[in-house]
Amino acid sequence: MKKLITLMLMLTFGMGIFAQDKSRAEVTFTTTKGKIVMELYNETPLHRDNFIKRIKSGILNGATFYRVIENFMIQFGPYEGEDTPEEIAGTVSRESNMVEAEFRYPEIYHRRGVLAAAREGDDVNPEQKSSALHFYIVWGKVSDDAGITRAKNRMATGTKGKYTMKPELETYYRQNPGTPHLDGAYTVFGEVTQGLELVGEIQKVKTNKNDKPLEPITILKAKVTRKGKFKK
């Protein structure tokens, strides 16, 4: 019975990837390496709407995967630095390029294939607001005892005790790849439904000392292929 319960928990926590939901918006990236299709969660409407608006503006066309770390994640955005040209020129405030945090932990967490928003550190961003222009897709790895302990400690410190790792998630991360140390601190707002193997290829490319791919990997076209509940 115990094994059966554990199996049911694993199926529940792992069923998101590739379980398409037509009420969700869908976006498709055509990249220099192939296509990646993602669904955006309705549980994180601020991030969903921001991502769709950015895609519709065309700003992600030509964006690159500029930070790639094997067994961790692939990060992309229209600018490699934290500041946009408009922010540097003083015509746009940094605040306008930020999104309020939408943590939905433990229901939504950092398993392989999820889409999340990057952000500045807590020292300059104590509210843990997300960047509206920088995003990453998780690859991750299976966690050992030390990894689980580090993730628990980071969560306890970073969230001041607001979040703790649930036993079922600890079991999940011991058996499935992800980045549990980011849970409760970065907003996850979607998941890859097609092209996960491409994410796996990208996270293995050769990079320089700054984790930038030696050969550019570019998003040729970012397109909303299903608007879901997005109404604007």
Image (cartoon, grey):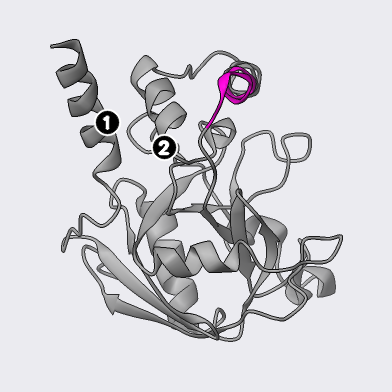
Taking the magenta stretch, the answer to whether it contains residue 146 is: yes
Q: In this view, does 80 lie to the left or right of 219?
A: right
Q: Quadrant of the C terminus?
A: bottom left
Q: What residue lies at 56% left-to-right and 57% top-to-bottom? A: 136
Q: Is mark 1 on a helix, strand or loop?
A: helix
Query: First in sequence: mark 2 or mark 1?
Result: 1
Question: Which segment is the magenta one?
Answer: 143-151
Taking the magenta stretch, the answer to whether it contains residue 42 is: no
Vertical comparison of 90 with 151: above or below: below
Vertical comparison of 93 with 45: above or below: below
Mark 2 surroundings: few (<14), some (14-19) or many (≥20) residues within 10 A: some
Quarter residue 169 falls in: top left
Quarter residue 26 falls in: bottom left
The tag on residue 176 is 2
Residue 20, percent across and down? 20, 59
Camera sees residue 119: yes
Type of the residue with mark 1: Met
Q: What residue lies at 30% left-to-right and 45% top-to-bottom? A: 43
* 127 or 145, nearer to the observer: 145
Vertical comparison of 187 with 98: above or below: above
Label pair 2/1, CB-CB below 8 angstroms: yes
Q: Is mark 2 on a helix, strand or loop?
A: loop
Q: What residue lies at 45% left-to-right and 36% top-to-bottom? A: 103
Q: Is the magenta stretch mostly helix, strand or loop?
A: helix
Q: What residue lies at 57% left-to-right and 81% top-to-bottom? A: 59
Find the residue positioned furthest to the right.
Answer: 209
Residue 207, percent across and down? 77, 66
Residue 226, percent across and down? 24, 74
**Location of mark 1 (residue):** 10
Residue 174, percent across and down? 45, 27
The tag on residue 66 is none
Type of the residue with mark 2: Asn
